Amino acid sequence: MVFGPSAPASPCGEAAFGSPRSACTAVLLAIWLALPCVAAGSDSASPTDAASSPASNQRRVLKLLPNFKMLHGAPTLSVDLAELLRDVDGIDSDGAITGSVLYNKKKKVAEVEIIDGRRLVVKGGKVGKTEVILELSDGKGTPIHSKFSVEVWEPDYWKLVLTVIGGLGLFLFGMKNISDGLQAVAGNRLRKMISLVTDNRLLAVGVGTLVTMIVQSSSITTVLVVGLVNSGFMSLTQAIGVVFGANIGTTITGWVLVLKIGKYGLPLAGAAAFGYLFISRDRIRYLCMGAMGVGLVFFGLELMKDGFSIIKDLPAFEQWFERFTADSYLGVLKCAAIGCVLTFIVQSSSATLGITIGLAQIGVIPFQTAAALVLGENIGTTITAWLASFGTTPNAKRAAYAHVLFNVLGVAWVTAVFPWYMMVIRSVVPGADTSEHVTAAIAATHTGFNVTNTILFLPFAHLMARFLARVIPERKVAEEPRLKVLDIRLLESPVLALEQSRAVVQRMAELCRQMMSVLGTILQSDTMEEEQVRTATQDEQTIDELQDEIVSFMTPLLASNMPEELIDEARRQLRIADEYESISDYIGRILKYQVKLQNAGFTYESQERESLLQLHQHVDEFLESIAQAYAGQDDITEELLEERGRHIAQEVRRLRRTMLERMADQSVPPRVSVTFNRQIIAYRRVRDHAVNVIEAIVGQK
């Protein structure tokens, strides 16, 4: 293509081309024509102009200032610029510092200015956040660009309250899931642990520790102990040992929180929830429930820490917390009192321990104050067992007061030597005052307190029992055990709830044996005392009441989420309780028939009396064997079911046949023969219901 005069080449003009070769020519020509202009521009530019250009690559970007967060209404912040810039290359921090302040957003929530060339002053305004750019000069003409933010905030108290409550709720729900999961996995092994308690104090302490570690609550363990003592199946000395162990076992909560899970708590809970929902095997399901509980515990703790972080930045709260510092004996007592009252209100030492650890981890309270709070929490947790002792027997009250006495005396001597106790804990847990190790230090404080107290007081358990026997004497009118005050608390722990109801079923068996004993005494003589009849009648009424209470107790328990093994045990106990109630009714009938016979002026001849007493003895021995088997002292065998039961049935048929023969001979008055037949038939009914008890024990339908 040929350029003509009508189309002069010009860098600013338009070129027409019709082929690739022409296009390349045009491009090369344009570049050639532009070179002189570029060279001319380069020669005319000075170094100073290049340095001062905003687009220059020589501008230095540094992070000199932190981001500021100011409480709304707080006083003006002042920062020493000279100190901040002392180590910045090229800046003379001894002289006046010049620069400008630019705002990256239109919304200004604070005023920022440089005063006297030395100080940066930040004055807060309305609530919000804005970015600030500080442009300084390093003395060589090179600008220094530094960006920071200023946030003005005001506390959201609703967020504080709701976050802490939500976190605490998840924390406690997680603890319950851990407890339910471990109990379901332990199952009958947990119940067998309780049956191992003997007068060996060390064994009792060990059982109390293990049971509490599984159920994650010393309150539940001590309530169970009160109930077992109330039912007469645990002595006071045994109960004291278990209570000591329960105080050690409850410290496991603090050590669980020492695990470095933190932010992984929610993913752990979510993953474990899938296992719990979709796995069919009970053992694995409840292990997943325990893992889900661990995750929720840590997620709840993180939420509480987020809520408490607001408190840390509020001067009013900080000043309030300064009043309760454990830097003196009076201060330690104040902190212990707060921990006691808080635990008294929420009825859970785990909850107050979680709050204490949450406050300590974010630095709201120092470790020493947290340790004093934990001491008070040990006293506050005794309220549950104390409330459970209302309306119980004197021995059960003594068991509850042993728990109170143990913790009160322990706190009394530890607070007296508190500075030295803290020295020991700090030597055991280095860095106890840092947020990284404060949880372990609090856990060590809790465990050390209870272990040391157990070592000190365990040798004096018998003396403590004697002291409590004097303080709480026996009443003139004997009190019958009741379950009413224990049902709500023990429903939180199905395994222990079943152990408590099992003790009441055993109590029903014992009362039936007592009725048989009174009946045997009456059958041996021609006269009877009204006190004996009244005792047997009262025993029958007590059995009726206990059976009603067990039904009321089991109804919500069966409706709860329990493993099939525990559901079967609950149904078995309901059946056995019903059978014992029927047994007591028939024993009562035999007694009424005897009373009517004697009131009518009739007595048995020696032959009838011996036959009836022999049958009574066989039935009584049968009931005793069943009661011992249910208590775990004997094994139930098919031979016991077949031989003894069949022998009693045969004996009843023989006695009835003999009496019919004597009636035919008219050697027995009709009133006597009718009463005799009714009584032996009632014994047969006792035997039938006793066989039903055996079938329930061995699992027959």
Image (cartoon, grey):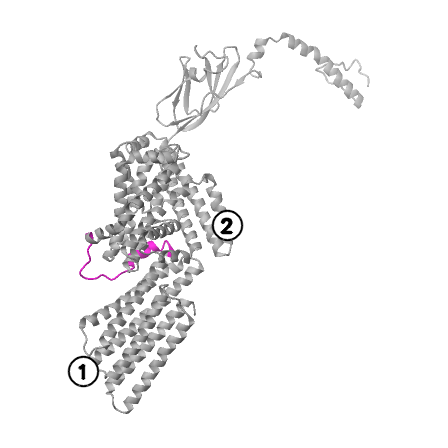
Magenta residues (range): 471-495
- 674 up-or-down from 175: above or below: below
Residue 39 point in image, percent of width and height: 68, 10
What's under tag 2, amino acid-wise?
Phe
Q: Main secondary structure of the magenta part?
A: loop
Residue 446 point in image, percent of width and height: 34, 41
Q: Is residue 258 magenta?
A: no
> In which quadrant is the N terminus drawn?
top right
How busy is the neighbourhood of tag 1: few (under 14 within 10 Å), some, or many (20 plus)?
few
**Depth-wise, is mark 2 or mark 1 nearer the camera?**
1
Q: Is residue 482 magenta?
A: yes
Q: Is residue 608 left or right of residue 50?
A: left
> In which quadrant is the C terminus drawn?
bottom left
Q: Mark 2 highlights which residue?
A: 274
Residue 260, can we see it? yes
Q: Is residue 306 left or right of residue 330?
A: right
Q: Out of 133 and 365, give the one closest to the viewer.
A: 365
Residue 458 point in image, percent of width and height: 29, 48
User: In this figure, what is the number of numbered marks?
Assistant: 2
What's under tag 1, amino acid-wise?
Gly
Residue drawn at x 44%, y 58% is 563
User: What separation in Å lies between label 2 and label 1 (alpha carbons)?
Assistant: 75 Å
Task: Report which quarter residue 631 is drawn in.
Answer: bottom left
State if disc 1 and disc 2 touch (CB < 8 Å).
no
Q: Mark 1 highlights which residue?
A: 601
Residue 156, can we see it? no
Q: Out of 284 and 487, give the one closest to the viewer.
A: 284
State the mark number for residue 304: none
Task: Report which quarter residue 674 is drawn in.
Answer: bottom left
Q: Earlier in the sequence, mark 2 or mark 1?
A: 2
Residue drawn at x 31%, y 36% is 421
